[in-house]
Image (cartoon, rainbow, N blue to C red):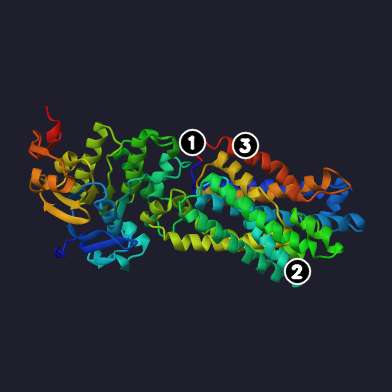
Amino acid sequence: MVEARADSLLNAQDLGFAYDGRPVLAGVGLELGPGQMLGVIGPNGSGKSTLLGLLCGLLPPDQGQVRLMGRPLAAFSRAQIARHLGLVPQAAQLAPGFTVAETVLAGRFALMGGRMFENQADQAAAARAMALTDISGLAQRRSGELSGGERQRLVLARALAAEPQVLLLDEPTSALDLEHQLRVMGLLETACRERGLAVCLVSHDLNLAGLFCGRLLLLSQGRPLAQGAPAEVLTPALIKRAYGVEVAVDQEPSRGRPRVTLLAPIETRL
Amino acid sequence: MKATAPAVGLVCLGLMGLVLLALLLGLWLGTVSITPAQFWDWLCGRLNGAPAIILSDLRLPRLLLAALVGACLSLCGAVFQGILRNPLAEPFILGVSGGAACGAVLALLMGVASLWSQSLLAFAGAVGTVFMVLAVARRRGSLETSTLVLTGVMINAFFTAVIMFVIATTTDQKLHAILFWLYGDLAAANLRQAYLLLPVTLVGGGVIFFFARHLNLLNAGDQAAAALGVAVERVKLILFLVVSLLVGVTVSLSGLIGFVGLMVPHLVRITLGHDHRLLLPASGLFGAAFLMLADTAARTVISPAALPVGVVTAALGAPFFVLLLAKRGSRWW
């Protein structure tokens, strides 16, 4: 049971969700305060994306409750949620005919209220988001012309333009090259430290998640298997239980975080 | 073009000039030639006799109706394209116009051919078709081009059958009128029709423009729009109802005028970009000018006989559609 704290931005208790009567998530609780970065890891079909859907209110929980800044998510309108909480979905949904600049600016939607056109503050926020994600040079390109990695950074920039307090990301680095993986994780870390942003990100990259996230939540078959510091979660025993594979774990040299190395199955070793 | 308030104002002003030009051209051209002096007299209210009747009672109502119908159909096309995320979505191609026509013809069959009841049944037919199309689209989130075209063809085939049934049971006198109406005809236009359509167009257009920023996000996909703060289901419902109303009233007044909602928004996007805050008002105004010009062509091409304007728009629009279909692989739309 995760207790709601006074400074909690996002809090979930005993979340459960079923698709057509088939449970895909059960008993998940988490707590996210300002400046915290939580990584959600787990094998395919373990309920990671479903969890993000529940946390941002796009899916209604069958069980449990999500609270945003202490209030139940269901009490907010979509625009109110979007003013505080951003989502970077896995499949980059973009309008292909819009330019990069137009797309990022459209991220300001929820903050504009009844205004029809963006003002200078909106323009400035969009420009900052584009600079952070290294897409300023693409401003006049159409989003339909971009590469996969560029699209991924564009979707992140659109979410950042709204300057949310909580940011949920579904595999934000999956299409990125090494430099941009570091850059994106670095900018999230900086925003957490300097602006008090709360981040919850789903990742398949255990090492990248372990390197940047203060806490990890390991899901297996829709249930939380472990939650805690990377060194507590990224252990050979837990990974074996969740993924069914043998790994070796040592320390990576830059921060002393756990480093997971995949081992070949025993029967195929030379 | 960047969508700012001055840019939208400027574009609207320019296009209003085009609308005015189209209006003047349409008044001037026709089987009976009007001299500039006569035209000037008519403007000053000094013209009498046959030329005055031709201008005031025939050409002017017809042009006004053409302008309103063109604006409505173009707006509806732009909305469908935005929400269904497919550049080929258009009331006629989707079968929504067919549904509306079916409702209007049924009104004729039941003998309740007043303007309002006909529009109401046409609206019902349009709403029904929209939700049928949505049921097909819902499964994928966006409407694939092949699904869209096939659905439209099937829906139109069904409604054509219904309409043919009505025609087969009707008397010969009405037949010519119904057939012309089916092909989209403005020959029977009168000012009363324009007065019915004007408030509908203004209110409907206003509501649609209010949701321009929502459409920008819906164009990216439902999930993205919801995450960024759009109440997706509610906004879509409102827009589909408004569009159905516009199509219903338009079709009951002018019949099946196809492809306007395809060509006009497309041409606007090429020149002004995809932002709906520019696209919607520009499409409305350009659509008004476009249909006035098309109807003028319909009246003059085989003068003294006249074509239904739907024949002109189909002759232009069908090749346009095929062209778009052929370069479907283009990277944006």
Q: Residue A27 falls in which quadrant of the image?
A: bottom left
Q: Position of residue A232 (x, y in %)?
A: 8, 48
Q: Secondary structure at mark 3?
A: helix
Q: Residue B180 falls in which quadrant of the image?
A: bottom right
Residues indicated by labels 2 and 1 sit on the same polypeptide chain: yes
Whichever of callouts 2 and 1 sits on the residue coming sooner in the sequence is 2
**Toward the viewer: A31 or A258?**
A258
- Circle 3 packing at 10 Å, graded few (<14), some (14-19), many (20+), is few
Which amino acid type is shown beneath numbered disc 2?
Leu
Whichever of callouts 3 and 1 sits on the residue coming sooner in the sequence is 3
Q: Is residue B108 above or below residue B262?
A: below
Q: Secondary structure at mark 1?
A: loop
Left or right? Give the position of A215 relative to B16.
left
Q: In the rendered structure, the residue with mark 2 lies on which chain?
A: B
Q: In the rendered structure, the residue with mark 1 lies on which chain?
A: B
Residues indicated by labels 3 and 2 sit on the same polypeptide chain: yes
Q: Residue at x 34, y 40 (%)?
A: A152
Q: Are marks 3 and 2 in contact (CB under 8 Å)?
A: no
**Toward the viewer: B70 or B10?**
B70
Q: CA distance from mark 3 to mark 2?
A: 38 Å
**Toward the viewer: B197 or B317?**
B317
Provide the residue designation for mark 2: B109
- Circle 2 packing at 10 Å, graded few (<14), some (14-19), many (20+), is some
Residue B331 is tagged as 1
Residues indicated by labels 3 and 1 sit on the same polypeptide chain: yes
